[in-house]
Image (cartoon, rainbow, N blue to C red):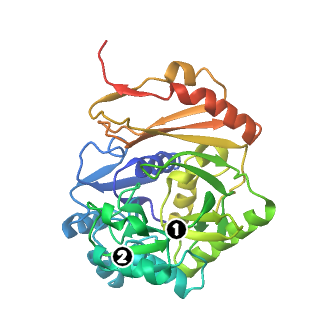
Amino acid sequence: MHRCIGIIGGGQLGRMFIEEALRYSVRCVIADADPDCPAALIAHDHVIGSIAKEATLVELARRADLLTYEIEHIFLEPLIRLEQEGKVRLIPSARVLEVVQDKGKQKEFLRQHGLATADFVLADGKSDWKGIATAKRWERFVVKTRRHGYDGRGVAVVRSNELHLVEDAFDVPAVLEEYVECDKELSVIVGRSGSGEMIAYPVVEMQFDPRANLVTQLLCPAQIDAGTEQQAVALAVETVRAFGSPGLYAVELFLDRSGRVLVNEIAPRPHNSGHHTLEACYTSQYEQLLRILLGWPLGSTGLLCPAVMINLLGPEGFSGPYDFAGYDKALNMEGVYVHMYGKKESRPMRKLGHVTVLADSVEKALQKAAAVRPHCVIKPFSNE
């Protein structure tokens, strides 16, 4: 049985995964260029090096029994070769990463497999935008860089009659996607075992910062009817089935105003929209991934109680060492759990932690979250 897991990346997702692995005495070795990355404090071993370099990945594979990843933006070619040569077991497989790393390939994958998604066209650069928007008769569309976008970076909403105002727009290969008039943005975490068994978590409803395009708050279960819930889970499961690889996947979805559910994007790893599972579900998304990696039975995804999760983001206009100012108030409330990620410096809109709020109903959880939120303040560090 594999007892040492290699994790490509040492961010907060890796940290929370290791916390679950330690409960089972499973060792984890990480690869990350930052010696003080969030997962470094609790990892059994640390390959300090860029995950964009072959030597780092080869060394991680040497030290571990199998590999997984907590970020998609990694050097893929050596992983493909090592996997083909049988020298490494990577979950999810390199072929999944090959699709997911490129948002254009993601969209083509969805179309090829008949999975509902917004209409799109691939563009080589900004010079193509006007012609595509005109041909498609799009009044508004979304531009996404095909590679290296994350946490709202590399995404822009553009009006076709205001292209002349977009002077600083990125001029790189991109996906131009029809703008969806969205009623809600949803997410479903899906686990797939090595034998092909599938299991899905309850649907989550996400609320975003409109400027940064980052999740600020989510609630579970989503406030949708039973038919929409079934549609969302079925579409998420079919999307993961199409990849044909074990792993844990987050399938982000749009619910449009006509009631259609569409796939937005897929992340083949633990996800921000699954943090609440640490307290709110029988099996957290991180433990589920551990079970999948080690060939253990999939765990129950049942919801113990409704939850709201609040992201703790770095404030605008400040970068540097910081404190979370809300412990006294937040921890004085029943069912409130604070998770700080151990990042040394705050930056505007950087994910620094999250707060999970549990209650007997979504309504009560939202009320409690509204009381907690004013105290969720990131402030400059002070010795005083």
Which residue lies at the image location 56% right of the left edge and 52% below the top edge?
A: 274
Q: Check the picture and name the quadrant holding the C terminus.
A: top left
Between 133 and 369, the residue placed more toward the observer is: 133
Q: Earlier in the sequence, mark 2 or mark 1?
A: 2
Q: Which mark is residue 129?
A: 2
Amino acid identity at mark 1: Tyr
Which corner quadrant of the image does residue 142 belong to? bottom left
Q: Is residue 98 above or below residue 27?
A: below
Q: Taking 187 as reference, is 223 left or right?
A: right
Question: Residue 137 placed where, x, y %?
Answer: 50, 78
Between 176 and 355, the residue placed more toward the observer is: 176
Which residue of the protein is positioned furthest toward the top in this rendering? 384
Which residue lies at the image location 61% right of the left edge and 61% below the top edge?
A: 182
Q: Is residue 133 above or below residue 66?
A: below
Q: For the image shown, how many numbered marks are present on the structure?
A: 2
Tag 1, which secondary structure?
Answer: loop
Q: Which mark is residue 179?
A: 1
Question: Residue 173 placed where, x, y %?
Answer: 31, 75
Which residue lies at the image location 27% right of the left edge and 72% below the top edge?
A: 172
Which corner quadrant of the image does residue 324 belong to? top left
Mark 1 crowd level (few <14, some 14–19, many ≥20, 10 Å Cα):
some
Tag 2, which secondary structure?
Answer: helix
Q: Is residue 158 above or below residue 99?
A: above
Question: What's the distance in space between the residues labelled 2 and 1, CA to CA?
Answer: 14 Å
